[in-house]
């Protein structure tokens, strides 16, 4: 390939921050438990930590840690109602993609 063409293609990767942010988001949902939680929150408007733990079959503390990671990347929102904490999916672009992919897999 010509050097000028390679240089042009190389410039497509110049926004390292955008690429790193995307990698972090995709990495976070790459874990099966996190993906299950994201799936549930894509399908249901809002769920409590206890409900998620019961459905997924893991401890409340494990779900809380996972949700904290998802919240740190901006994928989920948190709402407290007295002692109960509820989570919902955010409006990020990745959430839209995730919902579309889940829908595609459900058709199979």
Image (tube, rainbow, N blue to C red):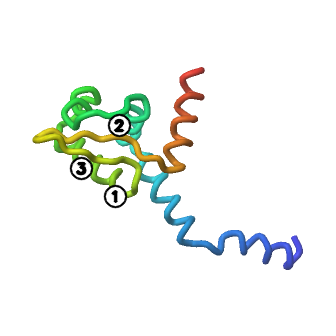
Q: Nearer the viewer, residue 6 or 78?
A: 78
For numbered disc 3, what is the local secondary structure? helix
The residue positioned farthest toward the front in the image shown: 81
Q: Earlier in the sequence, mark 3 or mark 2?
A: 2
Q: Quadrant of the C terminus?
A: top right
Q: Percent x, y for residue 25? A: 46, 54
* Number of callouts: 3
Which residue is located at x 22 percent, y 37 percent?
A: 49
Residue nearer the viewer, 42 or 29: 42
Locate residue 80, reporting x and y percent. 19, 44
Q: Which mark is residue 11?
A: none
Q: Is residue 26 left or right of residue 63?
A: right
Residue 95: where, in percent of width, then height?
Answer: 49, 44
In the image, is 87 to the left or to the right of 5?
Answer: left
Indicate which disc, 1 or 2, sits on the residue closer to the N terminus.
2
- Identified at 29% across, 30% down, the residue is 56
* Residue at figure coordinates x 37%, y 32% from the top left: 45
Q: Residues within 10 Å of mark 1 (few under 14, many from 20)?
A: few
- Outermost residue on the top side: it is 108
Q: Which residue is mark 2?
A: 37
Lateral position of residue 63 relative to residue 29, left or right: left
Give the answer, above or below, for where 72 lies relative to 33: below
Residue 82 occupies quadrant? top left
Which residue in the protein does label 3 denote?
65
Secondary structure of the residue carrying numbered label 1: helix
First reached walking from the N terminus: tag 3 or tag 1: 3
Measured as percent of width and height from the top left, residue 38 is found at: 40, 39
Indicate the secondary structure of the residue bearing disc 2.
helix
Alpha carbon distance from label 3 to label 2: 12 Å
Give the residue number, with chain letter if any, for mark 1.
72
Residue located at (87% from left, 70% from top): 1
């Amino acid at each position: 390939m010509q050097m000028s063409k390679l240089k042009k293609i190389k410039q497509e990767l110049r926004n390292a921050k955008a690429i790193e942010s995307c990698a972090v988001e995709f990495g976070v949902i790459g874990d099966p438990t996190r993906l299950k939680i994201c799936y549930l929150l894509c399908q249901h408007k809002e769920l409590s930590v206890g409900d998620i733990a019961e459905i997924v079959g893991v401890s409340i503390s494990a779900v809380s840690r996972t949700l904290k990671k998802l919240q740190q990347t901006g994928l989920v929102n948190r709402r407290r109602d007295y002692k109960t904490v509820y989570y919902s999916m955010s409006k990020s672009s990745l959430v839209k993609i995730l919902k579309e992919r889940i829908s595609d897999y459900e058709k199979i």
